[in-house]
Amino acid sequence: MGVLVTGFGPYDIGFDKADVNASWEGVQRIDKEGIQAKYGIQMIVQHLPVDYDEVQSKMTELWDEYKDFDLVMHVGLLKNIQGLRLEKQACKESYFFGDCKGCCPVDFEHPLGEKEAVFNTSLDVDGILDEYNSKPPEQLLAEVSEDAGKFLCEYVYFTSLYHSESKRVMFVHVPHEGYSYEQIARGLERFLCEYVYFTSLYHSESKRVMFVHVPHEGYSYEQIARGLERLLEIALKLCMN
């Protein structure tokens, strides 16, 4: 399984600026090695500038190199939110805000896709969100949105939705303040875990899929292994009945 995770760097577009972008700071603090080992996936982490042309160039390179990903998670900053926001769709038009160079796309449209195109993620956003909010890490709640902002966030989201045949792409907006970068990272990790679980449920006709969270401390690895063995034993007996 290949997973691409991106975050944006600092920006100054005149009426708004961020010397430090919480999206990239959060992405950098994701436990990449731990997640790769736990789920057997390859994770590619990419920094993106707040620049339409450079984002288009970098994303084209990534899609040309890897062809497709099992999941793409783009992360961006949105200052007027109190928690995480999971976006459902991205539009081709209305990119009126200039980037760090003061530039907009030609005719304020994304160069890919047909006129007035709107792409939706194929992920079960509402299901993932419900599961996430049932036990939010660091009390960092999330919500769903259908307006990704008509700026670089929506632009990169549209780019990946255009290239991805499976449309297994998500965009997560993170808040500018109120939470530490470590807390944001834990929230992003939770979304990744929920995706892996929902993917297994989606592909399984029988829905005989189990996901078990284990504690970080308090028990030895041997104790955790014995607990997992017991759960597996019970589950196998139930499946045979």
Image (cartoon, helix red, strand yellow):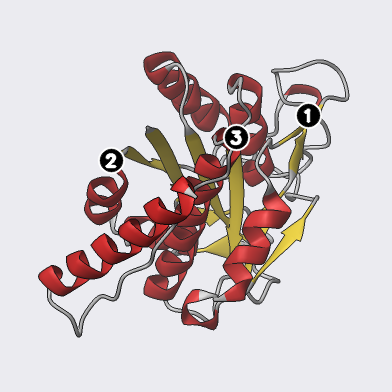
| Viewport quadrant of the N terminus | top left
Q: Examine the image and state in which quarter residue 5 appears.
A: top left
Cα separation between marks 3 and 2: 22 Å
> Looking at the rendered structure, which numbered label has been put on residue 40?
2
Secondary element type, mark 2: loop
Left or right of residue 28, residue 12 in this image: right
Secondary element type, mark 3: loop
Numbered-mark total: 3
Give the x, y percent position of residue 9.
Answer: 44, 51
- In depth, the one of 208 and 182 nearer the eye is 208
Give the x, y percent position of residue 234.
Answer: 37, 61
Within 10 Å of disc 1 (Cα), the crowding (few <14, some 14-19, many 20+) is many
Q: Inspect the image, locate mark 3, and give the three-letter code of the amino acid beneath it.
A: Glu
Q: Inspect the image, locate mark 2, and give the three-letter code of the amino acid beneath it.
A: Gly
Left or right of residue 176, residue 110 in this image: right
- In depth, the one of 19 and 201 nearer the eye is 201
Cα separation between marks 1 and 2: 35 Å
Left or right of residue 71, residue 121 in this image: right
Residue that label 1 marks: 92
Residue ID at (47%, 62%): 190
Residue that label 3 marks: 205
Whether residues under marks 1 and 2 lie with C-beta atoms below 8 angstroms apart, the answer is no
